[in-house]
Image (tube, helix red, strand yellow):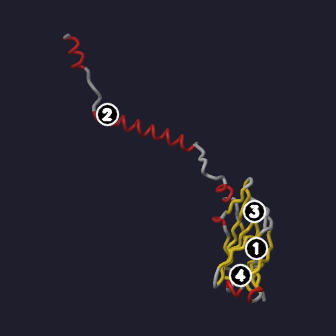
């Protein structure tokens, strides 16, 4: 019995400071393992379209420093003509043109407006000067096709404020 009491008396435990340090180290190591595992998990809600839109880029063509964006006509018989090029690395399926006028804005979804990489698109759209006023800005919003769905790449839109009247 005496030997048993002697063993218990001589047995020492881990000091509270060392125990705290060991617990913190274990928690940090466990956290690092969970975070590295989490990076490799693919999220089902995240769409691959974000990556595709990053490769979409438009440019209003210029001739001798003048952007090829013009407006003309009068009253309800006006028009806007522009030349836009696809300088990105992904084909554009459709283009939305947001016309910002003095009085109001107009959004036009151009039907046959696909632009292959490296190619231009020359279009003319109707513009009602009575309703929208003089053209102040054009915003070109690309749409791309991924599988069966069409994605609007609003963050990759192109704005042009240098629109000239046709003389």
Q: Quadrant of residue 41?
A: top right
Instruction: State yes or no: discs 4 and 2 in contact (Cβ < 8 Å).
Output: no
Local packing at callout 3 (Cα closer than 10 Å; few below 14, some 14-19, many 20+) is many
Residue under the image location 76 percent in, 80 percent down: 126
Distance from disc 2 to disc 1, alpha carbons, whole Å, reads: 69 Å
Mark 1–mark 4 CB contact (< 8 Å): no
Q: Earlier in the sequence, mark 4 or mark 2?
A: 2
Question: Residue 61 shows which numbered tag?
Answer: 1
* Vertical relation: 6 (above or below) 26: above
Q: Give the mark count.
A: 4
Q: Secondary structure at mark 4?
A: loop
Q: What residue did someone put label 4 on?
A: 163
Measure how far apart labels 4 and 3 are at the Cα level: 23 Å
Q: Nearer the viewer, mark 2 or mark 3?
A: 3
> Please, what secondary structure does the residue beneath circle 2 have?
helix
Labelled disc at residue 18: 2
Which residue lies at the image location 37% right of the left edge and 38% below the top edge?
24
Asked if 129 appears above or below 62 in the picture, the reply is below
Does 148 appear above or below 99? above
Local crowd size for mark 1, using a 10 Å CA cut-off: few (<14), some (14–19), many (≥20): some
| Residue 143: percent from left, percent from top | 71, 63
In front of the other: 146 or 70: 146
Q: Is residue 14 left or right of residue 77?
A: left
Task: Report how far apart the C-alphas of labels 1 and 3 lie in the structure.
Answer: 16 Å
Q: Residue at point 78% right, 68% down?
A: 111
Residue reaching furthest to the left: 2
Q: Earlier in the sequence, mark 4 or mark 3?
A: 3
Q: Residues within 10 Å of mark 2 (few under 14, many from 20)?
A: few
The circle drawn on residue 92 is: 3
- Label 1 element class: loop
The numbered mark, 2 or 3, whose residue comes first in the sequence reads: 2
């Amino acid at each position: 019995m005496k030997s048993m009491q002697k063993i218990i008396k001589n047995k020492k435990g881990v000091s509270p400071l060392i125990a705290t340090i060991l617990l913190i180290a274990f928690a940090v190591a466990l956290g690092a393992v969970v975070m590295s595992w989490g990076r490799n998990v693919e999220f089902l809600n995240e769409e691959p379209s974000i990556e595709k839109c990053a490769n979409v880029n438009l440019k209003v063509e210029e001739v001798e420093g003048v952007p090829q964006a013009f407006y003309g006509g009068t009253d309800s018989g006006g028009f806007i003509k522009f030349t836009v090029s696809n300088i990105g690395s992904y084909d554009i399926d459709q283009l939305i043109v947001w016309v910002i006028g003095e009085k109001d804005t107009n959004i036009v979804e151009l039907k046959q407006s696909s632009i292959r990489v490296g190619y231009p698109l020359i279009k003319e759209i109707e513009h009602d000067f009575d309703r929208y006023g003089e053209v102040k800005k054009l915003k070109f919003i690309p749409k791309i096709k991924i599988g069966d769905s069409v994605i609007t790449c609003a963050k990759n839109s192109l704005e042009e404020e240098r629109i000239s009247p046709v003389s």
